[in-house]
Image (tube, rainbow, N blue to C red):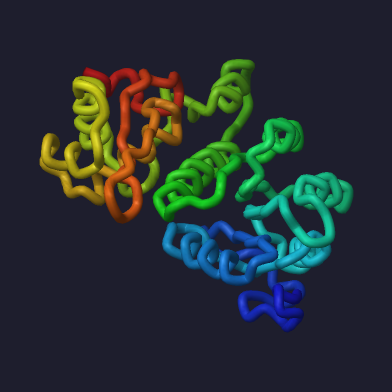
Amino acid sequence: MTGTSGTPDATGTAGEGAAGGGAIGVLVVDDDFMVARVHRAFVERVEPFRVVGVAGTGGEALAAVGELRPDLVLLDLYLPDVFGLDVIPRLRAAGHDCDVMVISAAREADAVRGAVRQGVVDYLLKPFEFEDLRVRLERYAVQRGRLLGTVVRSQADVDRVLAGAAPGAAAPALPKGMSVETAELVERTLREADGTLSASECAALTGVSRVSARRYLEYFHTVGTAEVSLRYGVAGRPERRYRYRGAVTGLALPPAARP
């Protein structure tokens, strides 16, 4: 395939296919090569994802999917040759069943509605931080594994898949590396807070590290249990503050784990 520079991409060659083993192969599509490089670095930090290629136009994306057979495409919408959402039906017409996650600065309601109609697995607004993408990738990996391993014997099995719950479980597992006990502690602390909490404040109240507190808070934000607001100081980047919104059935903690 060719990357944004028009030269062969070092991550894959024709016929190589997606990442082997248990890895999830990802194609990054963005016309800004610096942005694509950042997104690629973010993806490579999340197990079991592996970037198999990078494309800078809709045409390159179509060719790359045919050559590299990725499992997931991170798709920008503002491409130089075609609007990103128009790439999806072309992929389907060509017989490609890869999943698509939109990563774009497009905030128009029509773009979001169009993405939903096209069946994208997620929609992440630029700019974003590593944690924002990591939570979504981990959630996708859990859902993908569930779909691949599901055996449909009854309507209940179908309902569990559509609701996002694994067969025999009340709710999906937390992303890899996260524990129910810590998630329960962070969620309870957030729920009992008077107003909003920062990651640092949550860490101090729970005894976990600030990085861990931030990861759990971002997870709850992603699944809809928490909302985020920004507090701007005199200098530096704004502080992210979290407020409890309430549990979202089938997305946050299993009911049995709640206090």
Residue in front for this viewpoint, 146 or 94:
94
Residue shown at the point (44%, 19%) measured from the top left: 249
Please determine whether, in this image, residue 184 is positioned above or below residue 239: above
Say which quarter of the image contains residue 60. Answer: bottom right
Residue shown at the point (12%, 40%) measured from the top left: 204
Please state, as top left, top right, bottom left or bottom right, where the N terminus lies in the image. bottom right
In the displayed structure, does residue 142 sit left or right of residue 179? right
Please determine whether, in this image, residue 71 is positioned above or below residue 34: above
- Residue placed farthest to the right in the image? 93
Residue shown at the point (87%, 53%) measured from the top left: 94
| Percent x, y of residue 164 | 53, 28
| Percent x, y of residue 102 | 64, 47
| Percent x, y of residue 152 | 63, 27
Residue shown at the point (33%, 43%) measured from the top left: 232
| Percent x, y of residue 97 | 75, 48
Total numbered labels: 0
Residue in front for this viewpoint, 94 or 158:
94
- Residue placed farthest to the front in the image? 234
Residue in front for this viewpoint, 155 or 137:
137
Please determine whether, in this image, residue 32 is positioned above or below residue 111: below
Please state, as top left, top right, bottom left or bottom right, where the C terminus lies in the image. top left
In the displayed structure, does residue 139 sit left or right of residue 87? left
Please determine whether, in this image, residue 105 is positioned above or below residue 147: below
